[in-house]
Amino acid sequence: MLTVTCLILADAGGCVLATRRPLDKALGGLWEFPGGKVEAGESPGEALRREIREELILELGALEVLTPVEHHYDFGKIRLLPFLARCPERPAIHLVEHTDARWLAPEDFGSLEWAPADVPILGEIGRLLRGV
């Protein structure tokens, strides 16, 4: 099983950052929360910080662990470890790996086609961000 992390970056208004996968990669064109694989010797938090530096040129502050998700894709089983980070203002995002990014309110999550492993996280985020 592959262990993968993802970032739910929430602004002060309760919107979160979603990113679109490149068309030439697995799950191409689907939306996801950015992140990536946990490498040998890394903690999940370290892996997420590294991936976000590489993919968005962004340094993260405090992280809150959310509920893990296990999903079976055609290419294998993953364990997705989501982390929530809150930012008072939306940071500058530099898309290195992804083709698009959007800030979405929870009620707008249904407007995008999500990577299947990310879908269970959407409900938890909606509950957590009410009143943010």
Image (cartoon, rainbow, N blue to C red):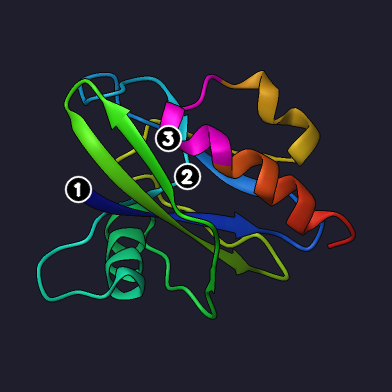
Residue at image position (23%, 25%) is: 26
Span shown in magenta: 113-120
Circle on res. 123: none
Residue at 36% in and 60% down = 52
In depth, the one of 88 and 42 nearer the eye is: 42
Percent of width and height locating residue 6: 42, 53
- Residue shown at the point (55%, 61%) measured from the top left: 66
Q: Quadrant of the C terminus?
A: bottom right
User: First in sequence: mark 3 or mark 2?
Assistant: 2
- Name which of mark 2 and mark 1 comes first in the sequence: 1
Secondary structure type for disc 1 = strand
Q: Which residue is mark 3?
A: 117
Count the labels in the image: 3
| Three-letter code, disc 1 | Leu
- Asked whether disc 2 touches disc 1, contact meaning CB atoms under 8 Å apart, the reply is no
Q: Position of residue 65 (x, y in %)?
A: 52, 68
Residue carrying label 1: 2
Q: Which residue is mark 2?
A: 33
Q: Amino acid at mark 2?
A: Phe
Q: CA distance from mark 3 to mark 2?
A: 10 Å
